[in-house]
Image (tube, grey):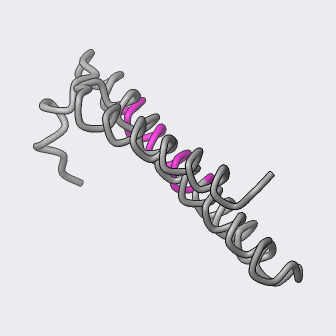
């Protein structure tokens, strides 16, 4: 497989994620779109590092990025769950007046 195929798949993931994040109003669906965009970025970064220098330095950095993304998404889903339980609504418009 060539670098162009990986970059095309990454661009497709980013495009689908952008459409999903901008077209939905349900918080979980917006977060799924963001997750797809981040996965596209990770795929593009991994492919570039593999084809430019196949040393494990880039892969270690990508593992750190994936771990940080996992924590960020877990916290986002926790906030979405709390908003859903408190207000019985999961739309993004109802989450504008969040306060401590």
Q: Which range is magenta?
A: 70-82
Q: Residue furthest right?
A: 55
Q: Position of residue 41 (x, y in %)?
A: 54, 59
The image quarter containing residue 18 is: top left
Q: Position of residue 45 (x, y in %)?
A: 63, 68
Between 14 and 65, which is closer to the camera in this rendering? Answer: 14
Q: Residue furthest top?
A: 88
Seen at 30% across and 31% down, the residue is 83
Between 42 and 87, which is closer to the camera in this rendering? Answer: 42
Height in image: 42 above or below 21?
below
Seen at 29% across and 25% down, the residue is 86
Height in image: 43 above or below 84?
below
Magenta run includes residue 77: yes
Relative to 44, is 54 on the left or the right?
right
Height in image: 96 above or below 81?
below
Q: Position of residue 37 (x, y in %)?
A: 46, 48
Between 43 and 38, which is closer to the camera in this rendering? Answer: 43
Name the chief secondary structure element in magenta.
helix
Q: Position of residue 84 (x, y in %)?
A: 33, 23
């Amino acid at each position: 497989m060539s670098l162009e195929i990986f970059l095309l798949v990454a661009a497709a993931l980013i495009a689908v994620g952008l459409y999903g994040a901008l077209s939905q109003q349900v918080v979980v669906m917006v977060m799924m779109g963001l997750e797809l965009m981040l996965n596209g970025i990770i795929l593009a970064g991994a492919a570039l590092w593999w084809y430019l220098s196949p040393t494990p330095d880039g892969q270690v950095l990508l593992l750190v990025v994936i771990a940080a993304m996992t924590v960020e998404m877990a916290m986002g889903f926790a906030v979405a769950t709390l908003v859903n339980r408190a207000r019985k609504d999961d739309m993004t418009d109802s989450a504008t007046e969040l306060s401590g």
